[in-house]
Image (tube, rainbow, N blue to C red):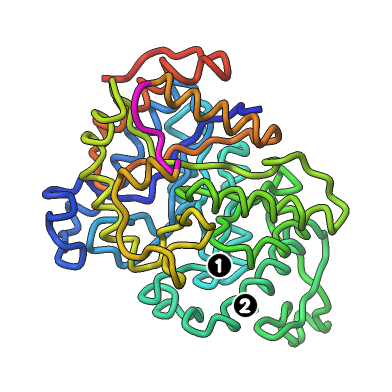
Amino acid sequence: MIKHFSVLYVGHIALENVGRDGTPADARCYPNERLVEAMAMAEDVAHTMDDLGYDTLWMAEHHFQREGYECIPNLILFGTYLATQTRRVKFGCAFNVTPMWHPIRLAEDYAMADYLSRGRVVMGVGRGYHTREVESLGGPLLDAEANAALFREQMEILFKAFNEERWSHAGRFYTIPAEVAYRGYQLRDVTLVPRPINRPVEMWQAIASGKSIPFMVQHGIKGMVTMNGELVTRQIFGQYRDEAARVGRNLAPGEDLAWGAGLYLADSVEAGIDGVRPYHDERYKWFAPFGFVRYADEQGRPWGTPGAPTGVPTIEEGVRQKAWLVGPASTVIARLRELEAEYPGLEHIVLHWPEGMPADEWKTQLGLFARDVMPAFQPVAASGLRT
């Protein structure tokens, strides 16, 4: 049963000249005075979400983004600050790209955020997809085997650090503690100081393909599945449940998963398509080259595979694939009811803030959704939008 409504914000600024025929993505290059607008936009929307009863503002970690699409480099730090400016909304890390971190520093930073925010920063991890940032910050990405092996070892260290009072680790990439003498004795183990107050730590990871799912279910990592076509979503949800059963976890369909979609409410589907089209097209100008078109054809073949479509989708295709919630509230409610019926264990819905959309326009969308859609699934005490 759907209980929680959240937002995914990848960290864009309010882009001008958006759309398929607008400024090419790689031609965008903004000064620092513009790039910091992403933080102001996030704070503005966080206040609105707090007022309207939303659950979590998820944000993405990225680096070197002078193009203006993904401009937040430290989710834990920013989430901790935002928690001091709001009352109840949580701040999710979608996701801390672990190959760009030392796992001890990541564990320490999260533990401090957990204490300072009183549990309102939500942990999320990922392996990365930008060569510019992962490789430049010392992690492997082009070498897929090394990237996966490093991620798994970092996760092993994170789990030890969070859950064990005294621990050690010897692996391919890390030896902790270092094999040195300390104050007259040989180090055998260490303790993370501080450890998170709220344990076990709730942890999330994006699911872009099925390869990560066995590791996730073995370690109790929840999955976020966003902007996927209906057939791809069904395959991922089914695989997650099947893999969990193999390790003795009997989950209801959709349990421990979040489903995400783009959103644009309007009086009709046609009006919604017209309203969101420039932002939809701007999104895929940036993300399609990274392989982020997760649709399938009628035969179930993923886009980009032999015989299936390829290239940049239209918003009409996104609506047909049921990756976007577009149109009147009644249409959106009907789609969410379909999801409830197919996935009775699904509790989390994540609304994707379309890339390039200004904060004021998105706040209007969140207000409409809170007024016209959320009450069908949960009681909401909204105090109204801030001015």
Taking depth in this image into account, of 176 and 88 the one nearest to the observer is: 88
Which element is circle 2 on? helix
Left or right: 177 in relation to 362: right
- The answer to whether residue 176 is above or below residue 117 is below
What residue type is disc 1 on? Thr
Whole-percent x, y for residue 290 in the image = 38, 67
Q: Earlier in the sequence, mark 1 or mark 2?
A: 1
Contact between labelled residues 2 and 1, with CB atoms less than 8 Å apart: yes
Q: Residue at x 43, y 64 (%)?
A: 308
Asked if residue 142 can be seen in this view, the reply is yes
Q: Residue at x 62, y 53 (%)?
A: 235
Q: CA distance from mark 1 to mark 2?
A: 9 Å
- The answer to whether residue 74 is above or below residue 83 is below
- The answer to whether residue 274 is above or below residue 288 is above
Residue 160 falls within the magenta-colored stretch: no
Q: Residue at x 72, y 78 (%)?
A: 176
**Range drawn in magenta:** 322-328
Asked if residue 112 can be seen in this view, the reply is no
Taking depth in this image into account, of 328 and 164 the one nearest to the observer is: 328
Label 1 Cα neighbours within 10 Å, binned few <14 / some 14-19 / many ≥20:
many
Label 2 Cα neighbours within 10 Å, binned few <14 / some 14-19 / many ≥20:
many
Taking depth in this image into account, of 291 and 103 the one nearest to the observer is: 291
Whole-percent x, y for residue 273 in the image = 27, 36
Q: Which residue is mark 1?
A: 98
Q: Which residue is mark 2?
A: 150
Q: Quadrant of the C terminus?
A: top left
Whole-percent x, y for residue 358 in the image = 23, 38
Q: Residue at x 44, y 69 (%)?
A: 307
**Circle on res. 142:** none
What residue type is disc 2 on? Leu
